[in-house]
Amino acid sequence: MSFNIPSLCAVGHNVLLMPWMIAPTHRSRSQREITITRKSQLMSQPHDFQALPEPTPFYRWAVLLFVSLAMFGNYYVYDSMWPVIDLMRTDLGFSYQQIGLLSAAYNVAALCVLLIGGYIIDRFGTKKAITVFALICLFAAFLTAATPHYEVIFAGRFLLGIGAEPLIVAATTVLAKWFKGKELSFAFGINLSISRLGSASADWSTSFASPLYMNWQDPLWLATAVAGISVSAALLYWMMEKRAEGRYQIGNSQAAEKIELKSLYKFSASYWYIVALCVVFYAVVFPFRTFAIDYFQQAHGITREAAGLLSSLLPVAAIILTPIFGFWVDRVGRRSLFMAVGALVMLPLFLAVTYLPAGPDVPLVIPFIGSAMVPLTLFVVIFMLGAVFSLIPAVMWPSVAYIVEARRLGSAFALMTMCQQLGWAVVPFIVGVLNDRNSAGPENIAGYAPSMWFYTALASFGLYFAYKLWRSETGPNAHGLETITSRAGN
């Protein structure tokens, strides 16, 4: 029986060749069997020493920066369509229902690719996955801007879903690999902040690129140029991780497990409560953002520039607060409790923006971008929604890394994102139908109320699932979401 010594080496470990591992030819059969047994034990047991050092903090944060910049371009491209909804309705004759279908096309594509995308990430590695998915996003942005034909724009949004959502899963897996056991929630917070800067920049483009908004097409060409940032950043990340291999210990590089439907997704109840909360949360927030700028213009009579600045409050609040919440949660734990609090705060916001008096106009200033006067009620509600938009994801996504084993993280994140996309795909279409059937518009502001009640109903389900997660994590089958803290050295 032969034994391949190099197969003993794993990422982050160096196997020493001990004298007993060299079997002389005169040994008996039983002696050789003992030797083989000891070799097998060495392979199956974790080593108590590390030959490769951990990457320096600078190296880890540089990886975080490039992965986050790849996400920045991705988020910008996705959100670049929403400021031109009114132009698409007037110039191209699109209905709210058609706009909702353009949003749904992205999610349907994500549903089609995410399961296999998670396996690709686990099987072929994050370097190749992020770069390939970023290139797909770039071509999708080009296709969306290239023609006024609805079918081609639909195809572009569909292709964007094929590339963008697996890219997000790959980036999430990278952070879990490089930061688990360290500043994981804080790293997720930084990543989300930079990503959402892309969303905010798409909203701000109504101000800093206002000359482009003479038609629907030029802002989308700008988005195509920004998509190039994703590709460049992905290539830089590839080079950095390639250089780190063999030099640093960069996480638990276990073999990717095979996809077996009978066993792959047998996760704990806590995992499924997080998935359910994820579905509801994103099915509320992102469809609301889809129609937000148009809603502010039509229902509250503010300009496109003011509506863009107001809509940007949601990602801007997230940019500022997400890393703060992530750092705070790393220090104090209580992750499921924080998610429940966020779900409770979100519940009344959509009815408030519908039925509360608008209040006096207040100045909204975004340094270096622009300023506008906006109603006080809208300002407060959108800022609070931004705080929720910061808190729940900053806690929710890294929590998965604590309740799912490392070799299944790629598939766990992919399944979670797939379920998220399922809810997210349905809601914009329903909102579009509600707006069209109730003749929502500046002449009939009350026509927007049914969609706001729909958001509120979804938010109530989010509160229920957050409560169930908290109960699970304070019971006997807890995974440490309430107790694991960076101060405790975990």
Image: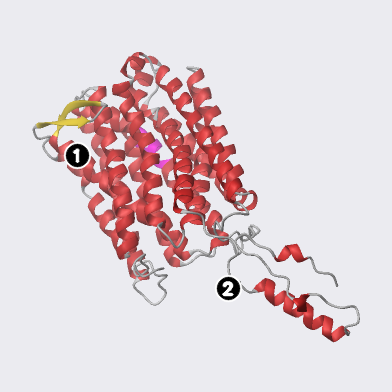
Look at the magenta stretch and give its main secondary structure.
helix
- Using the image as rendered, state which of residue 60 and residue 17 is in the foreground: 17
How far separated are the C-alphas under marks 2 and 1? 58 Å
Q: Nearer the viewer, residue 12 or 107?
A: 12
The x and y percentages for residue 326 are: 34, 54
> Relative to 5, does residue 291 appear above or below in the rendering?
above
42 sits to left or right of 86: right
Residue 33: image tag: none
Q: Residue furthest right?
A: 26
- What is the span of residues highlighted in magenta in the rendered image? 426-433
Q: Residues within 10 Å of mark 1 (few under 14, many from 20)?
A: some
Q: Decide if residue 439 is in sight here.
A: no
Q: Which type of secondary structure does the marked residue at label 1 adopt?
A: helix
The amino acid type, in three-letter code, at marker 1 is Val
Residue 430 among those drawn in magenta: yes
- Give coordinates of residue 101: x percent, y percent: 44, 32
Q: Residue at x 29, y 34 (%)?
A: 312
Residue 414 falls left or right of residue 463 = right
- Residue pictured at 16% horizontal, 30% vertical: 374
Q: Earlier in the sequence, mark 2 or mark 1?
A: 2
The three-letter amino acid code for the residue at tag 2 is Asp
Give how far across and how far down residue 80 sits, in percent. 40, 28
Q: Secondary structure at mark 2?
A: loop
Image quadrant where one finds the N terminus: bottom right
**Residue 30 vertical position relative to residue 155 in the rendered view, above or below:** below
Q: Which residue is mark 2?
A: 48
The residue pinned by badge 1 equals 353
Q: Is residue 383 above or below residue 179?
A: above
As drawn, the residue found furthest toward the left would be 360
